[in-house]
Each structure stands twice: as structure tokens, then as C-alpha cells.
Amino acid sequence: MTLGTILLIVLILILIGAIPAWPHSRSWGYGPSGGLGLVVVILLILILLGYV
């Protein structure tokens, strides 16, 4: 596995953990999951373009 793939998997797991539907993150709002989602999208674009 490449570093980019491992990083993408870790970020997706963090994104799932930050979804506001979970009891521990219900009061956080959509900020953490929105920010992490943006990072995942940027990383996915960089992987598809071959920069990572």
C-alpha cells in the first residue's frame, strides 16, 4: 500500500467518527465532518492526479 492510500483510509475513518449522528460528537455540529470531508476530497484528487 502506498502512503496516499493509507492516509486516505485513515482520513475516511476519522470522517466517519466525526459525523454528528454519533453520541460523542452530537454537539460539535457539521464543522469537523465538513472540514475532514474537504481534506478527503483534496487528497483523493491529488491521488488520482498522481501527486501523492
Image: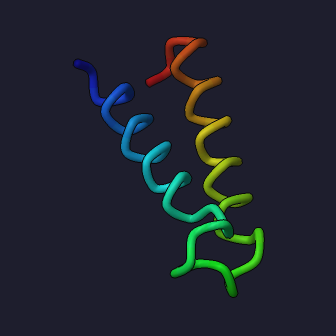
Establish if 42 lies above or below 47: below
Where residue 33 sits, quadrant-wise, is bottom right
Q: Quadrant of the C terminus?
A: top left
What colour scheme has been applied to the protein in the rendered image?
Answer: rainbow
Which of the two residues, 11 or 50, is positioned nearer the viewer here?
Answer: 11
Image point (36%, 25%), residue name: 5
Establish if 11 lies above or below 52: below
Q: State left or right for residue 48 relative to residue 13.
A: right
Q: State left or right for residue 44 relative to residue 27.
A: left
Establish if 4 lies above or below 19: above
Which of the two residues, 22 or 36, is positioned nearer the viewer here?
Answer: 22
Where residue 34 sits, quadrant-wise, is bottom right
Establish if 41 lies above or below 23: above
Image point (65%, 36%), residue name: 42
Image point (67%, 35%), residue name: 41
Q: Quadrant of the N terminus?
A: top left
Q: Position of residue 43 (x, y in %)?
A: 56, 34
Q: Position of residue 44 (x, y in %)?
A: 58, 27
Image point (74%, 71%), residue name: 31
Q: Position of residue 4 (x, y in %)?
A: 38, 28
Which of the two residues, 5 or 25, is positioned nearer the viewer here?
Answer: 25
Q: State left or right for residue 7 relative to residue 38.
A: left
Number of numbered discs overlaid on the protein picture: 0
The single residue placed furthest to the bottom in the displayed view is: 27
